[in-house]
Amino acid sequence: MKLQQILPAALILAITCYLFTPGAASLLSGANFFAWRKEFILLTGISAFTCMSLAMLLAVRPAWLEGHIGGLDKGYALHKWLGIAAGVLILLHWLGHDGAKWLVEAGLVQRPVRAGGEARGATGFSFKELAHQLGSWSFYVMAALVVLALTKRFPYKYFHWVHKAFGVIFLIGTYHGLVLMPQAWWSQPAGWLMIAVGAIGSACALWSLAGLIGRSRTRHGKVTHIDLADGGIIDLRIRLDGEGLTHKAGQFAFLKFDTLEGAHPFTIASAGHDPQALRFAIKPLGDYTQTLLNRIKAGQAVAVEGPYGRFDFSGNAEHEVWVAGGIGITPFMARLEDLAAHGGARRPTELWYSTATRFEAAFPADLEAQCQRAGVRLKRVIADEDGRLSAQHLAQHSGDLSRTAVWFCGPLPFADSLRRGLTQHGLPKAAFHAERFAMR
């Protein structure tokens, strides 16, 4: 299944299971407004719950799932859209519940006569009433969390902890959904789906809240070198303890220097021949990386989680074109080192290094020598002097695109522009490889 089909498939599964319920069938026999309202609440509820459960599963970064979704970066994009879909569905769910009250108060509809309520114990406690109250309060909390999660200016160190709260929200949602689920659903596909996604999502939520995400893939070490290199790039070297980290050129890892700050993803700029030695090239762009040079010192402890990613230069294309946009040069640095250690490139390969200014193009200082050792032709494009690198320019200088694989690392708008243009010039869609390096 393609990545973009997973969200629609999840919704189709939830809707299909709902259609087998007695309530769905009753709508065909002239149901009134409140019967439609009840079924609308149930349908949006099961759909939102399914999306939230899948989002929770992706959040814990299971290693077995990465290969099926084409890399963790794709998983985070899917996680984001599952979260947005769940948020919209929960909003509709809430409107279905509270909106009817507004219509009754406005005199537009008449409230039906209520049947007997849930039996209460000697203490007057009601599980269903608690489920209603928790659901209502958690909606307001979740709405605020979704707004914060989608606000790019919200600092990542706070976003990291705010995002943790979604685990608590999911556990509350599980209680809300299972307690208020119609009794008949327990023996029907809709109920089975609710139980399954509730169990999966709750397990993932508890795993996250316990701080166990990525624990088995985490190695510890120390910073051996950090300075500001040519081009304004932070050159960071790490030495790991124990067995180190085995990775392929092009993969990335999460670095955590401070427990309160959380982990941040960076592409590994070294080939991995020494699993204990890692190099990272970091451009000070965000609220975290801009202060990194002042906060990190040689000898400081660091936790490294990974490796992740499927940007691994695999395949059997006759010709390769690499495109690096700015700091997107990092995976190609690792690949150049790897090729040089194994006799050089075995197929014609060009590296197009596109930067905004000549100053940015100064990193890494030994790029020409790296390319020469790896048997890769280097072509520089400096936007201030040459104009922006375009798909048309690449197509004119890349020969038969039908036999070519393009590996791109750089800004997402640049990637989208090249992908559209190159496919129009004959590049197979599957031959354009790029990671969507956006974790929020």
Image (tube, rainbow, N blue to C red):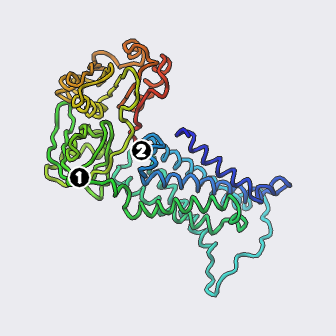
| Label 2 crowd (10 A; few <14 / some 14-19 / many >=20) | many
Where is residue 392, by image quadrant? Answer: top left
Determine whether label 1 and label 2 are within 8 Å by CB: no
Q: Residue at x 68, y 50 (%)?
A: 15
Q: Is residue 125 above or below residue 14?
A: below
Q: Residue at x 37, y 36 (%)?
A: 311
Where is residue 325, by image quadrant? Answer: top left
| Label 1 crowd (10 A; few <14 / some 14-19 / many >=20) | few
Q: Quadrant of the C terminus?
A: top left
Point out residue 338 in the picture as x, y percentages from the top left corner.
Answer: 25, 33
Please tell me which of labels 1 and 2 falls first in the chain. Answer: 2
**Three-letter code for the amino acid on which mark 2 is drawn:** Leu
| Rendered image: mark on residue 243 | 1
- The residue to which callout 2 is attached is 72
Q: Residue at x 65, y 67 (%)?
A: 180
The answer to whether residue 264 shows anywhere in this view is no
| 341 on left or right of 78 | left
Viewer-proximal residue, 324 or 361? 324
Viewer-proximal residue, 284 or 110? 284
**Three-letter code for the amino acid on which mark 1 is drawn:** Glu
* Name of the residue lying farthest toward the right: 29
Point out residue 71 in the picture as x, y percentages from the top left corner.
Answer: 42, 41
The answer to whether residue 86 shows anywhere in this view is yes
Q: Under tag 2, what secondary structure?
A: helix
Q: Quadrant of the N terminus?
A: top right
Mark 1 to mark 2 CA distance (whole Å): 23 Å
Point out residue 364 in the picture as x, y percentages from the top left corner.
Answer: 20, 30
Viewer-proximal residue, 290 or 53? 53
